[in-house]
Image (cartoon, helix red, strand yellow):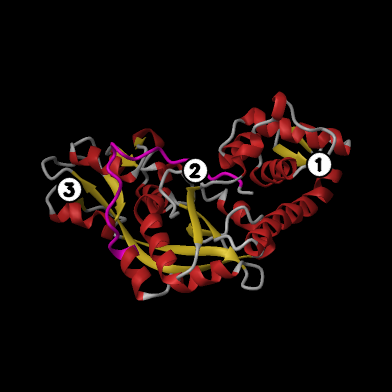
Amino acid sequence: MPGIPGAVPRGLAEHWRPRGGRHDHGRVTLTQLSAFVLVARLGSVKDAAKALNVSEPAVSQALTALRQHVGDQLITRDANGMTLTPGGARLLPVASQMVALGAEAQAAVRAAQGLPSQLRLVTTSVIAEFIAGPLTEAFSRRLGRGVEASAGVAASTEMPVLVANRLADLALGPSLADPGLGLVSEPVFRCKMVAVTSPRGATRGGAPSWPWLVDPSGVDPASDVTRLLRRLGVPESRVMVFPNQTAAWAAAADGEGVAPGVAHLVSHQVRRGELRMVETAATPMEATWYATSLSRDLRPSVVGSLRNFLGTPEAMQLMRAPRGGVPPSRFRPPVYVTIWS
Protein backbone atom coordinates (compact mmCIF):
# COMPACT_ATOMS: atom_id res chain seq x y z
CA MET A 1 0.00 0.00 0.00
CA PRO A 2 1.23 3.50 -0.69
CA GLY A 3 2.29 5.50 2.31
CA ILE A 4 -0.23 7.93 3.79
CA PRO A 5 0.92 11.16 5.42
CA GLY A 6 0.50 10.82 9.14
CA ALA A 7 0.19 7.01 9.03
CA VAL A 8 2.59 4.84 11.03
CA PRO A 9 4.41 2.44 8.67
CA ARG A 10 3.91 -1.17 9.58
CA GLY A 11 6.87 -2.72 11.36
CA LEU A 12 8.34 -3.60 14.69
CA ALA A 13 5.90 -1.56 16.74
CA GLU A 14 4.55 -4.84 18.08
CA HIS A 15 8.03 -5.77 19.33
CA TRP A 16 7.85 -2.83 21.72
CA ARG A 17 4.94 -4.40 23.61
CA PRO A 18 6.63 -6.45 26.35
CA ARG A 19 4.97 -9.79 26.98
CA GLY A 20 3.78 -10.03 30.53
CA GLY A 21 4.93 -6.48 31.17
CA ARG A 22 8.66 -7.27 31.13
CA HIS A 23 11.50 -7.60 28.64
CA ASP A 24 13.47 -10.81 28.13
CA HIS A 25 16.70 -10.27 30.10
CA GLY A 26 18.12 -13.65 29.07
CA ARG A 27 19.19 -12.69 25.56
CA VAL A 28 20.08 -9.70 23.48
CA THR A 29 17.31 -8.73 21.05
CA LEU A 30 17.20 -6.48 18.03
CA THR A 31 14.75 -4.31 19.97
CA GLN A 32 17.37 -3.72 22.67
CA LEU A 33 20.14 -3.05 20.15
CA SER A 34 17.91 -0.68 18.19
CA ALA A 35 17.09 1.26 21.35
CA PHE A 36 20.78 1.52 22.22
CA VAL A 37 21.78 2.65 18.72
CA LEU A 38 19.10 5.34 18.56
CA VAL A 39 19.78 6.66 22.07
CA ALA A 40 23.50 6.78 21.30
CA ARG A 41 23.07 8.42 17.88
CA LEU A 42 20.30 10.88 18.85
CA GLY A 43 21.64 11.73 22.29
CA SER A 44 18.61 11.08 24.50
CA VAL A 45 15.97 8.53 25.43
CA LYS A 46 13.31 11.12 24.62
CA ASP A 47 14.52 11.60 21.04
CA ALA A 48 14.92 7.85 20.53
CA ALA A 49 11.37 7.24 21.76
CA LYS A 50 10.06 9.96 19.45
CA ALA A 51 11.85 8.43 16.47
CA LEU A 52 10.47 4.99 17.33
CA ASN A 53 6.99 6.33 18.09
CA VAL A 54 6.97 4.54 21.44
CA SER A 55 6.99 5.67 25.05
CA GLU A 56 10.17 6.70 26.82
CA PRO A 57 9.74 3.91 29.42
CA ALA A 58 9.70 1.35 26.57
CA VAL A 59 13.08 2.59 25.33
CA SER A 60 14.46 2.81 28.87
CA GLN A 61 13.36 -0.76 29.63
CA ALA A 62 14.98 -2.08 26.45
CA LEU A 63 18.20 -0.22 27.25
CA THR A 64 18.17 -1.48 30.84
CA ALA A 65 17.75 -5.08 29.69
CA LEU A 66 20.74 -4.71 27.35
CA ARG A 67 22.85 -3.15 30.11
CA GLN A 68 22.03 -6.03 32.46
CA HIS A 69 22.86 -8.61 29.82
CA VAL A 70 26.28 -7.17 28.88
CA GLY A 71 27.15 -5.94 32.39
CA ASP A 72 27.95 -2.39 31.30
CA GLN A 73 26.15 0.92 31.57
CA LEU A 74 26.95 1.58 27.87
CA ILE A 75 25.67 5.18 28.07
CA THR A 76 25.98 7.58 30.99
CA ARG A 77 24.60 11.06 31.51
CA ASP A 78 26.69 14.00 32.64
CA ALA A 79 26.51 17.80 32.45
CA ASN A 80 27.25 17.66 28.72
CA GLY A 81 24.54 15.10 27.94
CA MET A 82 24.83 11.43 26.99
CA THR A 83 28.33 9.86 26.91
CA LEU A 84 29.29 6.39 25.77
CA THR A 85 31.32 4.23 28.13
CA PRO A 86 34.35 2.47 26.59
CA GLY A 87 32.17 -0.63 26.29
CA GLY A 88 29.36 1.36 24.71
CA ALA A 89 31.75 2.93 22.22
CA ARG A 90 32.91 -0.53 21.13
CA LEU A 91 29.39 -1.91 21.02
CA LEU A 92 27.87 0.92 18.94
CA PRO A 93 29.34 0.02 15.51
CA VAL A 94 28.66 -3.67 16.13
CA ALA A 95 25.08 -2.98 17.24
CA SER A 96 24.53 -0.78 14.19
CA GLN A 97 25.71 -3.58 11.94
CA MET A 98 23.46 -6.10 13.68
CA VAL A 99 20.41 -3.86 13.35
CA ALA A 100 21.21 -3.37 9.67
CA LEU A 101 21.75 -7.13 9.18
CA GLY A 102 18.38 -7.74 10.83
CA ALA A 103 16.76 -5.53 8.19
CA GLU A 104 18.68 -7.34 5.43
CA ALA A 105 17.61 -10.72 6.79
CA GLN A 106 13.98 -9.62 6.77
CA ALA A 107 14.31 -8.44 3.16
CA ALA A 108 15.98 -11.69 2.10
CA VAL A 109 13.24 -13.84 3.62
CA ARG A 110 10.52 -11.68 2.04
CA ALA A 111 12.19 -12.05 -1.37
CA ALA A 112 12.44 -15.84 -0.96
CA GLN A 113 8.74 -15.97 -0.07
CA GLY A 114 7.82 -13.92 -3.13
CA LEU A 115 6.47 -11.08 -1.02
CA PRO A 116 6.48 -7.47 -2.24
CA SER A 117 9.65 -5.45 -1.78
CA GLN A 118 9.43 -3.00 1.09
CA LEU A 119 10.14 0.67 0.48
CA ARG A 120 10.35 2.77 3.63
CA LEU A 121 10.58 6.53 3.25
CA VAL A 122 11.13 9.22 5.83
CA THR A 123 10.31 12.75 4.77
CA THR A 124 9.72 16.25 6.01
CA SER A 125 6.15 17.02 7.10
CA VAL A 126 5.41 19.09 3.98
CA ILE A 127 6.64 16.38 1.59
CA ALA A 128 4.62 13.80 3.53
CA GLU A 129 1.51 15.97 3.31
CA PHE A 130 1.67 16.82 -0.38
CA ILE A 131 4.13 14.59 -2.22
CA ALA A 132 4.81 11.20 -0.60
CA GLY A 133 1.45 9.56 -1.38
CA PRO A 134 1.20 10.46 -5.10
CA LEU A 135 4.90 9.75 -5.59
CA THR A 136 4.86 6.25 -4.09
CA GLU A 137 1.64 5.41 -5.94
CA ALA A 138 3.15 6.43 -9.28
CA PHE A 139 6.40 4.59 -8.53
CA SER A 140 4.55 1.38 -7.67
CA ARG A 141 2.61 1.56 -10.95
CA ARG A 142 5.75 2.26 -12.96
CA LEU A 143 7.74 -0.58 -11.39
CA GLY A 144 5.07 -3.05 -12.44
CA ARG A 145 5.67 -5.46 -9.55
CA GLY A 146 4.76 -5.65 -5.91
CA VAL A 147 6.10 -2.85 -3.75
CA GLU A 148 4.91 -2.27 -0.20
CA ALA A 149 5.61 1.42 0.37
CA SER A 150 5.23 3.32 3.60
CA ALA A 151 6.14 6.86 4.60
CA GLY A 152 6.73 8.52 7.94
CA VAL A 153 7.69 11.99 9.11
CA ALA A 154 11.08 12.43 10.75
CA ALA A 155 13.21 15.32 11.94
CA SER A 156 16.47 16.12 10.17
CA THR A 157 18.44 14.76 13.14
CA GLU A 158 16.60 11.42 12.95
CA MET A 159 16.70 10.85 9.19
CA PRO A 160 20.40 9.97 8.84
CA VAL A 161 20.27 7.62 11.84
CA LEU A 162 17.27 5.77 10.46
CA VAL A 163 18.71 5.43 6.94
CA ALA A 164 22.26 4.56 8.07
CA ASN A 165 20.92 1.76 10.28
CA ARG A 166 18.57 0.53 7.51
CA LEU A 167 15.48 1.33 9.52
CA ALA A 168 14.42 3.46 6.56
CA ASP A 169 15.45 3.12 2.92
CA LEU A 170 15.44 6.69 1.69
CA ALA A 171 14.99 10.16 3.16
CA LEU A 172 13.45 12.97 1.14
CA GLY A 173 14.17 16.45 2.48
CA PRO A 174 17.35 18.32 3.45
CA SER A 175 20.85 17.25 2.43
CA LEU A 176 22.11 14.60 4.86
CA ALA A 177 25.32 13.46 3.14
CA ASP A 178 27.66 11.84 5.67
CA PRO A 179 30.59 9.71 4.47
CA GLY A 180 31.11 8.46 8.03
CA LEU A 181 27.63 6.92 8.01
CA GLY A 182 27.88 5.86 4.37
CA LEU A 183 25.10 8.25 3.29
CA VAL A 184 24.90 10.02 -0.06
CA SER A 185 22.53 12.92 -0.80
CA GLU A 186 21.55 13.88 -4.32
CA PRO A 187 19.43 16.90 -5.28
CA VAL A 188 16.13 15.90 -6.84
CA PHE A 189 14.01 19.06 -6.90
CA ARG A 190 14.57 22.81 -6.66
CA CYS A 191 11.86 25.14 -5.38
CA LYS A 192 11.33 28.50 -3.70
CA MET A 193 10.05 29.48 -0.29
CA VAL A 194 7.58 32.39 -0.08
CA ALA A 195 5.40 34.04 2.56
CA VAL A 196 1.60 34.29 2.32
CA THR A 197 -1.19 35.92 4.29
CA SER A 198 -4.84 36.90 4.02
CA PRO A 199 -5.72 39.00 0.96
CA ARG A 200 -7.97 41.09 3.22
CA GLY A 201 -5.43 41.97 5.88
CA ALA A 202 -2.43 44.30 5.96
CA THR A 203 0.98 43.44 7.40
CA ARG A 204 2.28 46.17 9.68
CA GLY A 205 5.81 46.60 10.94
CA GLY A 206 8.72 44.43 9.89
CA ALA A 207 8.75 40.67 9.33
CA PRO A 208 10.25 39.90 12.79
CA SER A 209 7.16 41.40 14.44
CA TRP A 210 4.56 39.48 12.41
CA PRO A 211 2.86 36.35 13.81
CA TRP A 212 4.37 33.46 11.81
CA LEU A 213 2.23 30.35 11.31
CA VAL A 214 4.30 27.27 10.52
CA ASP A 215 3.91 23.53 9.98
CA PRO A 216 5.90 21.12 12.25
CA SER A 217 9.08 21.65 10.20
CA GLY A 218 9.20 25.13 11.75
CA VAL A 219 10.76 23.57 14.87
CA ASP A 220 13.34 21.56 12.90
CA PRO A 221 16.67 23.46 12.94
CA ALA A 222 17.67 22.20 9.47
CA SER A 223 14.36 22.82 7.67
CA ASP A 224 13.78 25.39 4.94
CA VAL A 225 11.11 27.07 7.09
CA THR A 226 13.55 27.52 9.99
CA ARG A 227 16.21 28.76 7.60
CA LEU A 228 13.78 31.38 6.25
CA LEU A 229 12.70 32.55 9.72
CA ARG A 230 16.34 32.76 10.79
CA ARG A 231 17.18 34.95 7.80
CA LEU A 232 14.31 37.26 8.68
CA GLY A 233 15.30 37.43 12.34
CA VAL A 234 11.95 36.14 13.59
CA PRO A 235 12.05 35.42 17.35
CA GLU A 236 10.62 32.16 18.66
CA SER A 237 7.93 34.10 20.52
CA ARG A 238 6.38 35.15 17.18
CA VAL A 239 6.07 31.59 15.85
CA MET A 240 2.95 29.42 16.15
CA VAL A 241 3.17 25.75 15.13
CA PHE A 242 0.20 24.04 13.41
CA PRO A 243 -0.30 20.30 12.86
CA ASN A 244 0.32 20.58 9.11
CA GLN A 245 0.97 23.05 6.31
CA THR A 246 -2.65 23.16 5.15
CA ALA A 247 -3.81 24.19 8.62
CA ALA A 248 -1.16 26.93 8.80
CA TRP A 249 -2.28 28.32 5.44
CA ALA A 250 -5.93 28.19 6.53
CA ALA A 251 -5.06 30.25 9.62
CA ALA A 252 -3.16 32.73 7.45
CA ALA A 253 -6.18 33.02 5.14
CA ASP A 254 -8.30 33.84 8.21
CA GLY A 255 -5.99 36.75 9.00
CA GLU A 256 -4.13 35.21 11.95
CA GLY A 257 -0.68 35.96 10.58
CA VAL A 258 1.86 35.14 7.87
CA ALA A 259 2.76 31.61 6.80
CA PRO A 260 5.83 30.36 4.94
CA GLY A 261 5.24 27.95 2.10
CA VAL A 262 6.74 26.30 -0.94
CA ALA A 263 5.78 28.58 -3.84
CA HIS A 264 4.45 25.95 -6.25
CA LEU A 265 2.46 24.16 -3.52
CA VAL A 266 0.64 27.29 -2.36
CA SER A 267 0.23 28.81 -5.85
CA HIS A 268 -3.28 27.44 -6.47
CA GLN A 269 -4.58 29.10 -3.29
CA VAL A 270 -2.95 32.36 -4.33
CA ARG A 271 -4.52 32.10 -7.79
CA ARG A 272 -7.95 31.52 -6.22
CA GLY A 273 -7.53 34.64 -4.10
CA GLU A 274 -7.55 32.74 -0.80
CA LEU A 275 -4.02 33.93 0.03
CA ARG A 276 -1.67 36.61 -1.23
CA MET A 277 2.10 36.75 -1.41
CA VAL A 278 3.92 38.99 1.07
CA GLU A 279 7.20 40.61 0.12
CA THR A 280 10.06 40.11 2.60
CA ALA A 281 13.79 40.73 2.54
CA ALA A 282 14.44 36.97 2.31
CA THR A 283 11.79 35.77 -0.14
CA PRO A 284 11.61 34.18 -2.56
CA MET A 285 14.27 31.93 -1.03
CA GLU A 286 15.87 29.14 -3.03
CA ALA A 287 15.43 25.64 -1.58
CA THR A 288 16.36 22.13 -2.67
CA TRP A 289 14.93 18.72 -1.82
CA TYR A 290 17.47 15.90 -1.60
CA ALA A 291 17.16 12.13 -1.73
CA THR A 292 19.43 10.51 0.86
CA SER A 293 20.23 6.82 0.94
CA LEU A 294 23.10 4.43 1.49
CA SER A 295 25.72 4.31 -1.26
CA ARG A 296 24.87 2.44 -4.46
CA ASP A 297 26.67 -0.74 -3.41
CA LEU A 298 24.79 -0.95 -0.10
CA ARG A 299 21.24 0.18 -0.80
CA PRO A 300 18.50 -2.27 -1.85
CA SER A 301 17.72 -2.46 -5.57
CA VAL A 302 14.24 -0.99 -5.03
CA VAL A 303 15.87 2.16 -3.63
CA GLY A 304 17.99 2.48 -6.75
CA SER A 305 14.85 2.13 -8.84
CA LEU A 306 13.12 4.85 -6.82
CA ARG A 307 16.14 7.11 -7.11
CA ASN A 308 16.04 6.70 -10.92
CA PHE A 309 12.29 7.35 -10.93
CA LEU A 310 12.76 10.63 -9.05
CA GLY A 311 14.61 11.98 -12.09
CA THR A 312 11.85 11.18 -14.58
CA PRO A 313 9.43 13.75 -16.05
CA GLU A 314 6.53 11.96 -14.32
CA ALA A 315 8.10 12.33 -10.87
CA MET A 316 9.10 15.93 -11.57
CA GLN A 317 5.51 16.74 -12.53
CA LEU A 318 4.16 15.11 -9.35
CA MET A 319 6.54 17.13 -7.19
CA ARG A 320 5.70 20.28 -9.18
CA ALA A 321 1.91 19.81 -9.22
CA PRO A 322 0.68 17.19 -6.71
CA ARG A 323 -3.00 16.65 -6.05
CA GLY A 324 -3.06 19.21 -3.24
CA GLY A 325 -2.73 18.94 0.51
CA VAL A 326 -4.81 17.08 3.02
CA PRO A 327 -7.75 19.14 4.36
CA PRO A 328 -7.14 20.05 8.02
CA SER A 329 -10.27 18.20 9.11
CA ARG A 330 -8.94 14.94 7.63
CA PHE A 331 -5.26 15.31 8.45
CA ARG A 332 -3.91 13.21 11.27
CA PRO A 333 -1.04 14.88 13.16
CA PRO A 334 2.40 13.87 11.89
CA VAL A 335 3.98 10.92 13.63
CA TYR A 336 7.55 9.79 13.79
CA VAL A 337 8.66 6.71 11.98
CA THR A 338 8.77 3.38 13.79
CA ILE A 339 11.33 0.62 13.47
CA TRP A 340 10.36 -1.94 10.88
CA SER A 341 10.97 -5.63 11.19
* Kind of residue indicated by mark 2: Val
Residue 207, percent from left and from top: 28, 44
Does the image show residue 305?
Answer: yes
List x then y, in percent, for residue 287: 38, 61
Residue 285 falls inside the magenta stretch: no
- Distance between the alpha carbons at the discs numbered 1 and 3: 55 Å
The residue under label 1 is 28
Q: Which circle marks residue 275 in the picture?
A: 3
Q: Residue lying furthest top in this view?
A: 21
Residue 174 visible here: no
Dominant secondary structure, magenta:
loop
Establish if 58 lies above or below 258.
above
Q: Are there few (<14), some (14-19), or many (20+) residues within 10 Å of tag 3?
A: many
- What is the secondary structure assignment of the residue under circle 2? loop
Query: Between residues 245 and 234, which one lies in front from this camera angle?
Result: 245
Point out the tag, 2 or 3, that comes first from the N-terminus: 2
Which residue occupies 12% across, 50% down?
Answer: 273
Query: Which residue in the structure is indicated by mark 2?
Result: 8
Circle 2: is it few (<14), some (14-19), or many (20+) Cα within 10 Å?
some
Label count reads 3
Question: Mark 3 or mark 1, which is nearer the start of the sequence?
Answer: 1
Check the image and report above or below for 323 versus 253.
Answer: below
Q: Position of residue 172 (x, y in %)?
A: 47, 59
Q: Nearer the viewer, mark 2 or mark 3?
A: 2
Residue 25 vs residue 185, the one in the foreground: 25
Q: Secondary structure at mark 1?
A: loop
Q: Amino acid at mark 3?
A: Leu
- What's the magenta region? 319-339
| Residue located at (27% from left, 39% from top) | 210
- Which numbered disc covers residue 92? none
- Residue 325 in the magenta stretch? The answer is yes
